[in-house]
Image: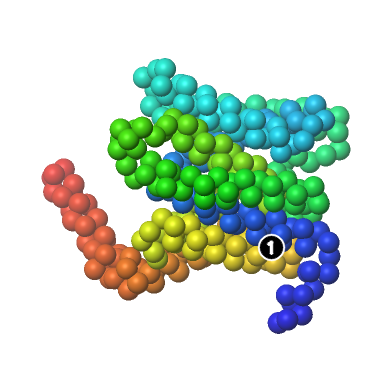
Amino acid sequence: MLEILIEPLQYGFMQRSLMTAILVGIICAVVGSYLMVQRLALLGESVSHSVLPGVAIAFILGVDIFLGAFIAGVISAVMIAWVRTRSPVKEDAAMGIIYSAFFSLGITLITIVQKNNKIDLLHFLFGNILGVTTRDVINTSVIAVIVVGAIALLYKELLFYTFDPEGAQASGLPINLLDFGLIILMSLTIVASLTTVGLALVVALLITPGATAYLLVKRLHQMMILGAVIGVLASISGMYLSYYFNIPSGPAIVMVAFGFFMLAFLFSPTHGVLTHPSRGPGLAQSQIWQEIRGLLATKK
């Protein structure tokens, strides 16, 4: 058993990957807790896919891919807010429009880039365990310090804004700045996850650890701490699975995180389906069958 744990650590790329995965697991859970409580999971999905053209443009211009992805993520979030506030189009529709447009542009640019360059930028979609460099570790570490530091500094304000936005506005808090700041932190978190879980799956790591913790604890700070622990465990386990079974790191990490969620969903002391059967499938199935019988009776 010990040999299984030690063997991957003999390789530099695995050390870098594990370090990055741990940092990503922490910041994804911390930021994702806010997204889940505020019901902004769809915004995370939109921004995560919208950074793809930034990756391609940064590669074309020869600048840091992290910078290009961050700028594209912020622009997409601003455009979603702009469309939502300046037209009758609802927020979910605005997200769908901007997300699909940015993602399509990213795929188009990557296709053009690949015609003249022997490089596979599509690994950013699903993570690439072999692609983590020392520079990636440094970038991710800096992002982690910024994200955790900002949330620790503004915890009370963000807590107030999250659970009582109207009261926060009435008390004089700059809620628009807080909202934009949360978008910035989310964009940074997504950028940090590029090489580990990839753009296609980062929203799962943003939401799943926090959702798992939500089933187990009651307070937001407890949710963030427990979510970070779950995110780290899922990231480390996923990396080992990726190493030994030669599968992409992103899907491996997400499936482990989903496994933790299902355990909490089934066995949570307060919300578990099996520990609280009155809330579980029996009641749900009974209600479903009642509705079906009602529909059939109406048709007759």
- Name which residue lies at 46% across and 21% down: 83
| Amino acid type for the residue under numbered disc 1 | Met
Please state which of residues 113 and 134 is positioned toward the viewer in this rendering: 134
Q: Residue at x 73, y 81 (%)?
A: 2
Q: In this view, does 171 lie above or below 265?
A: above
Q: Is mark 1 on a helix, strand or loop?
A: helix
Relative depth, front residue between 83 and 221: 221
Q: Can residue 224 be seen in this view?
A: yes
What residue lies at 80% left-to-right and 28% top-to-bottom?
Answer: 60
Quadrant including the N terminus: bottom right
Density class for disc 1 (Cα within 10 Å; few <14, some 14-19, many ≥20) is: many
Q: Does residue 11 lie above or below 153 as drawn?
A: below
Q: Is residue 29 left or right of residue 265?
A: right
Coordinates of residue 142 in the picture (x, y in percent): 69, 47
Does 218 sit above or below residue 184?
below
Q: In this view, does 36 lie above or below 79?
A: below
Q: Is residue 176 left or right of residue 197?
A: left
Q: Nearer the viewer, residue 285 or 82?
A: 82
Query: For the image shown, how many numbered marks are present on the structure?
Result: 1
- Pinpoint residue 104: horizontal percent, then vertical percent: 62, 29
Question: Circle 1 is placed at which residue position?
Answer: 239
Which residue reaches farthest top? 86
Q: Where is residue 8 in the image (x, y as percent from the top left)?
A: 78, 69
Task: From the viewer's side, name the closer residue of 84 and 144.
Answer: 144
Residue drawn where x is 59% and y is 39% of the image = 187
- Looking at the picture, how far across and down is residue 106, in whole percent? 67, 30
Can residue 100 be seen here? The reply is no
Locate residue 206 relative to residue 216 in the image: left or right: right
Q: Quadrant of residue 120 in the image?
A: top right
